Amino acid sequence: MSDSKPRSPRGHPSTPRAALEALLAEPAGGPVRRALWLDELDQRFRPLLPPSLAAHARLANYERGRLVFVVDAPVWRAKLRLAAPELLDAARSIGLDAAELIVKTTTPVTASPQSDRKAKPISAAALQALQAALASLKEPDPSGSKDAT
């Protein structure tokens, strides 16, 4: 028996790493490369953030001298903005030409208040009105008579 690794039909190892490397080699891999670069940059920033902020802030983008962070609540937005001079200095210390700090707050996804409401039973009068409205939308009788009874 051979102790070689299983190969995909094209002769490449069928591993997630090989698939990622193949994707990155393609011209379409640009966004993936950028996302990986931003993630690496975020990992380098994490120890430079004030300890109380590190769990609540994430580097979202860096472009044309702008650092964009995303935080999970307005209080962390305010605290991160107060730390802007130190963060810009930290960015310069790791080789970025950062001149501006932008902080955005994410909004948590919650169920709408209406989805928690129970449907009320329909009254007899409302039911009759609804049935009359539906009946008016029906196709006319092909025989031409107005009364189907």
Image (cartoon, grey):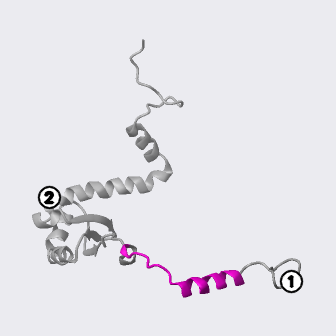
Disc 2 target residue: 47
- Kindly identify the amino acid type of the residue bearing the numbered disc 1: Ser
Q: Return the x and y of residue 5 as percentages of the image width and height.
A: 40, 24
Q: CA distance from mark 2 to mark 1?
A: 82 Å
Q: Return the x and y of residue 46 as percentages of the image width and height.
A: 18, 59
The label nearer to you, 2 versus 1, is: 1
Q: Please tell me whether residue 107 is drawn above or below residue 36 in the rendered image.
A: below
Q: Nearer the viewer, residue 149 or 56?
A: 149
Magenta span: 116-136
The image quarter in which residue 59 lies: bottom left
Disc 1 target residue: 145
Q: Return the x and y of residue 74 as percentages of the image width and height.
A: 22, 77
- Kindly identify the amino acid type of the residue bearing the numbered disc 2: Pro
133 horizontally vs 101: left or right:
right
21 horizontally vs 37: left or right:
right
Q: Residue at x 40, y 20 (%)?
A: 4
Farthest residue to the right: give it.
143
Q: Secondary structure at mark 1?
A: loop
